[in-house]
Structures are given as structure tokens and as C-alpha cells.
Image: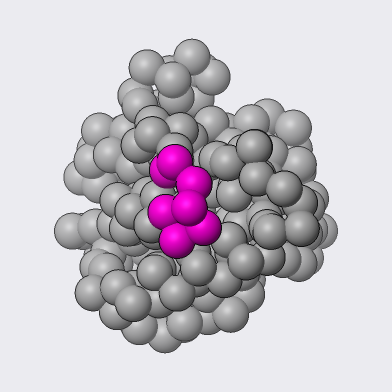
Amino acid sequence: MKHGTMAKRFELIVFDWDGTLMDSAAAIVASIQAAARDLGLAPPSEDRARHVIGLGLGEALRHALPELAEARHEELADRYRHHYLAQDHELALFEGAAGLVQALGEAGHLLAIATGKSRKGLDRALGQSGLGALFQATRCADECHSKPHPQMLEELMDEFGVSPATTLMIGDTTHDLLMAKNAGTGAVGVAYGAHPPAVLAAEAPLHLAMNIEDLRRWLDANG
């Protein structure tokens, strides 16, 4: 977010959504656990449910409940959507997130989202949050391979004609950091979302932000 004539290090900054901009990790965990109970299954632990956040829904539920027969996965997904939709209107952006995104756009960065949400789910969240107009492009898990496959980042870089060296991925899970590694881009982890700080640090991101203000300071100095 440097001003003046100094060149920006990162032309394209790509955000994850859940647990990075939107404070939704706890709601996702609760919805996975409630869906399991609806099917008469023992719910996954909070740690296990948190670990799958960021993956596409089908892949996330398979990882969270590997014992479930394949024939019942759509039933599980339907129950997950039921529980999540009952509360998603109550979810809020992390404090300072909207201001950060706006400031990055004003500083001339291209902004995009790469998320494990469905297109329908992301469009709803962008509309409810009021951030939709600030992002030039978005990619969702029902349009691309799920993270950590690099397809989302590769498509975004192709769309804008930018290189991996000038692209930064920001996310709260190892799925985000590994996607960035697979795409050859820079990565910053945020420690206030789904995955524990020590797990994120093990992937050696350029920075591990403890909160939105920390993230903003790092981007001011390095973006």
C-alpha cells in the first residue's frame, strides 16, 4: 500500500474469504457437527472440523467424516447448508477488514478472492457484506479444483496478466498457503481464523498476521 511513484511489490492480492475476511469459522464448525448429528453420526471434533475449512464443501465433508458412505454425502451436504444458511445472515466481517480491502484498492492493487465457498454462497456473502464492488475477480470451489490445487490462483493470474512474483495470497489455513506454494506466489497467513498459528507458521509464509491491524501494517511496509 505504498503511495507515490514507488512500484508495488504485489500487483494482485488474493484473499481467502471464510476465516480471513469473514468471521465464520465457528459457524462452519457448528454446521458440520450439526449435520453429522442429523445423520445419526458422531460429530467430528472441533479441531478436525476446523482443519477442513477452506476446502470445497464435498471434499471438506469427506475429510471431516471419512466413515460416511459415499451415497449419503449429498444428504450430509444438504444438512450442512441448512444449518449454515440459518445463521449466515448473522455473520460479520472481522473488524477492520472492509477498511483494509478498500485501502488496498485505493492504493492501486488488483484485488481478488479464492475461496472454498460455492459461487452461490460467495455471491450471497459479497452482497451481504457490501464488499462485492471492491474485488475485480473471484474464484470458487465449484468452478475450480479445491485448494491446495493452484488452479484458482493460476486462473486469476492469467486473467490479469500478472506473474507469480507479483501475486500475494492471504489466508487463514494451510490449504491457502499450500495453494500459493503450488502456484509459485507469495503467501501471508492470518492467525485469527481456522488453523492454529503454529500450523500456519510451519508452512513458512512471508508473514503471519495476528490480527487485521497487523496485516495492514505488513502490507503497508511490504505490499
- The quarter of the picture where the C terminus appears is top left
In this picture, is 14 found above or below 103? above
What kind of colouring is applied to the model shown? one colour
Q: Quadrant of residue 45?
A: top left
Residue 85 falls left or right of residue 13: left
Number of numbered discs overlaid on the protein picture: 0
- Does residue 40 show up magenta in the picture? yes
Query: 210 and 53: which one is in front?
Result: 53
Is residue 112 something that shows in the picture?
no
Query: 152 and 89: which one is in front?
Result: 89
Question: Residue 106: percent from the left, percent from the top?
Answer: 39, 69
Q: Residue at x 35, y 83 (%)?
A: 128
Q: What stretch of residues is rendered in magenta?
A: 37-43
Q: Furthest residue to the front? A: 40
Residue 196 falls left or right of residue 124: left
- Does residue 155 show up magenta in the picture? no
Q: Residue at x 68, y 65 (%)?
A: 74
Q: Main secondary structure of the magenta part?
A: loop
In this picture, is 53 found above or below 66? below
Q: Residue at x 68, y 58 (%)?
A: 73
In this picture, is 25 found above or below 84? above
Residue 210 falls left or right of residue 223: left
Question: Residue 37: percent from the left, percent from the top?
Answer: 42, 54
Question: Residue 46: percent from the left, percent from the top?
Answer: 35, 37
Q: Residue at x 44, y 24 (%)?
A: 200
Q: Quadrant of residue 163?
A: top right
Residue 183 falls left or right of residue 89: right
Is residue 178 something that shows in the picture?
yes
